[in-house]
Amino acid sequence: MIILNDKCQLIQKRGKKLCVYIQWFVPVYNSEHTLQELYTRLEKVFRETIKEEFELILVDDGSKDRSFEVMKELREKDSRVKIIQMARNFGQHPALLCGFAHAKGEFIVTMDDDLQHQPEELPKMINVMNERDDVDVIIASYEGRKHNLIRKLGTKLSVWATSKMLGKDPNLQITSYRLIRRFLVEAMLKTNTYLPQIGNLLVLSSNRIINVPVQHAARAYGKSGYSFRRLVKDLIYDITAHTAFPLLMVRNIGIASFLVSLCLAIYYLVRYFMFGISVEGWTSLMLVMLAFFGLTLLSIGIIGIYLMNILNEAKKMPHYVIRQEETD
């Protein structure tokens, strides 16, 4: 994640200089092989394109490799690098909130640490933000997305679900490469959501969100932490945390089932009393009973998920715990 700093960053555009406040902030997880290159490319973008000082904040989200040692080496080499180590792996979105708590600038930029988000594309996003006072958030849309098949399918399903549940424009891509105005960051820091999803919080907070197309690189090292299981878990939480759709769906199925059973009961009663035709066998009855039994269990399960969400939020557990930091 990147955060825009209090220092005035100047970008030459159309013969005039535009003032932007920039600070970089990146959540890190098992990225010992990419951090040095990421730092080098970020530094080059500011030195050669933006031509101003910068600050880079790295948050170690419970890495199991040498990521934090590499972060310390970067810190020793360049005092503009700030480092934070979390007590365990809390996840990408809590790590983003941790970064937001250290934000000082007018704008915040979030990006991943795997080099799929190219630092060289940031000036393009900054220029658009400076042109558009009516925009609160710029989200990078990927040209030639390099994610694997599971990630692509999960993304499409998530986009469809959030557009239906949250009233989001279905053509708006939600990615983790973003440029955000600070007032939205301050609003998100006040959330009491058990598992915060930054993209959903942004959509719920503002409708002034646009995409800017950028190049998307292939993953250089390792594999994505977004497994099929993780994507399904996040989708279920998104649905149950932001909408009553599953409860309404079960309610409607229950109403429809009652009406169908009522019509069948009337039909069979009419057949029996008027024509003396009785219902033969128990097969149909057993099938109906099994169907209603399954529907009842499904209803209990859905209600249980909502109750668990309420319980987790009532606990007011911290979104993250900082083990150590060097941010002075």
Image (cartoon, grey):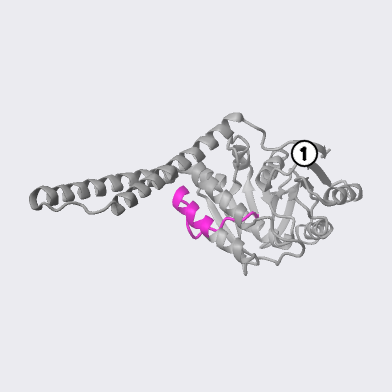
Image location of residue 43, percent across then percent down: 81, 57
Q: Quadrant of the C terminus?
A: top right
First to last magenta residue range: 157-177
* Residue 286 at x, y percent in the picture: 33, 50
- Residue 213 image-quadrant placement: bottom right
Locate residue 15, reporting x and y percent: 69, 62
* Residue 90 shown left or right of residue 83 in the figure: left
> Would you say residue 170 sits in the magenta stretch?
yes
At 56% from the left edge and 59% from the top edge, which residue is drawn? Answer: 154
Horizontal side, residue 294 vs residue 210: left or right:
left
Amino acid at the residue labelled 1: Ala
Closer to us: 246 or 290: 290
On screen, residue 321 above or below 30:
above
Q: Nearer the viewer, residue 170 or 130?
A: 170
Q: State the SS at label 1.
A: loop
Evaluate whether residue 190 shows in this view: yes
Q: Position of residue 132 (x, y in %)?
A: 57, 54
Count of marks overlaid on the render: 1
- How many C-alpha atoms fall within 10 Å of the one at disc 1: few (<14), some, or many (≥20)? some
Look at 47% across and 48% down and name the residue there.
166
In the image, 143: left or right of 10? Answer: left
Residue that lies at the very extreme toward the front in this rendered image:
281
Residue 171: in magenta span: yes
Residue drawn at the location 62% of the way across and 52% of the way down: 230
Residue under label 1: 87
Which residue corresponds to the image point at 64% horizontal and 65% vertical from the top-left? 148
**In the rendered image, is residue 135 in sight?**
no
